[in-house]
Image: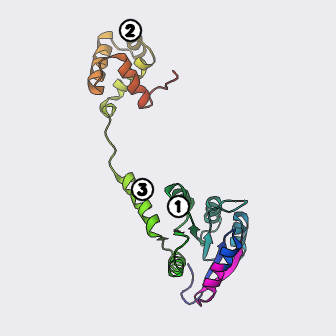
Amino acid sequence: MTASNAPIRVILAEDHTIVREGLRALLSVRDDIDVVAEVGNGRAAVEAVGVHRPDVIVMDLGMPELNGVDATRLVRERFKDTQVLILSMHSSEEYVRPAIRAGANGYLVKGSGLSDLVSAIVALAKGEAFFSPAIAKILLQESRRAAAPKKSEPSDGLTNRERQVLTLVAEGKSSPDIAQLLSLSVKTVEGHRSRIMTKLETHNVAGMVRHAIRIGLVSADE
């Protein structure tokens, strides 16, 4: 986090020279932001952070030598005080999620205004996060999915013993075999099988096997 009276030290990592120079030109007019370096590939971005120790690095995703996600991960692992702001043309979940998981604290879509870029840089320099509205929506949806209660499965009601019996049935073991393996009577095993079929709402061994495969008790190859 930068001192309140010092300009925010920024590195620009963008492989398109015209875009990089345009960003520098836009930011150079501000007294509160100092662009200390600019680079054109991901490996150079990581090296530049090691040399300049900026407050924020503005990182493109599609760079040569080392992509933006991997570069972000290395920066966040090696230089904890440098925050990563992704500036990308991509706003779909398949691009956003890996960048956030790699450690980016901000994600701005190219085409955003200068005010958004400045706001994002300032926010990250303070240790805060900043996301374009479209990106924030993706993150909110993902958060809601993670928080939503999982749909219950019929197999959730099985006891440990019933899961053992179900596994052995799916492996092709007969009731006498299961009785011997689990040190139970055949009558007890048959009782377990009956309760398992009731709980799984199935009426035959094939249905039991399908459930066992679906919940990972056995492999479909077995």
Q: Mark 2 and 3 residues: CB-CB less than 8 Å, in contact?
A: no
Kindly identify the residue that appears in the image at 62 percent across and 63 percent down: 61
In the picture of the structure, the residue carrying the numbered disc 3 is 142
Task: Give whichever of discs 2 and 3 has the lower sequence position.
Answer: 3
In the picture of the structure, the residue carrying the numbered disc 2 is 176
Label 1 and label 2: CA atoms lie apart by 54 Å
Q: What label does residue 100 carry, if any?
A: 1
Label 3 sits on a secondary structure element that is: helix
Label 1 and label 3: CA atoms lie apart by 12 Å
- Whether residue 157 is visible to the viewer of this picture, yes or no, is yes
Q: Is residue 210 magenta?
A: no
Q: Position of residue 133 (x, y in %)?
A: 43, 69
Q: Position of residue 122 (x, y in %)?
A: 52, 80
Kindly identify the residue that appears in the image at 42 percent across and 30 percent down: 214
The vertical placement of 30 against 197, above or below, is below
Say which of 30 and 170 sits in front. 30
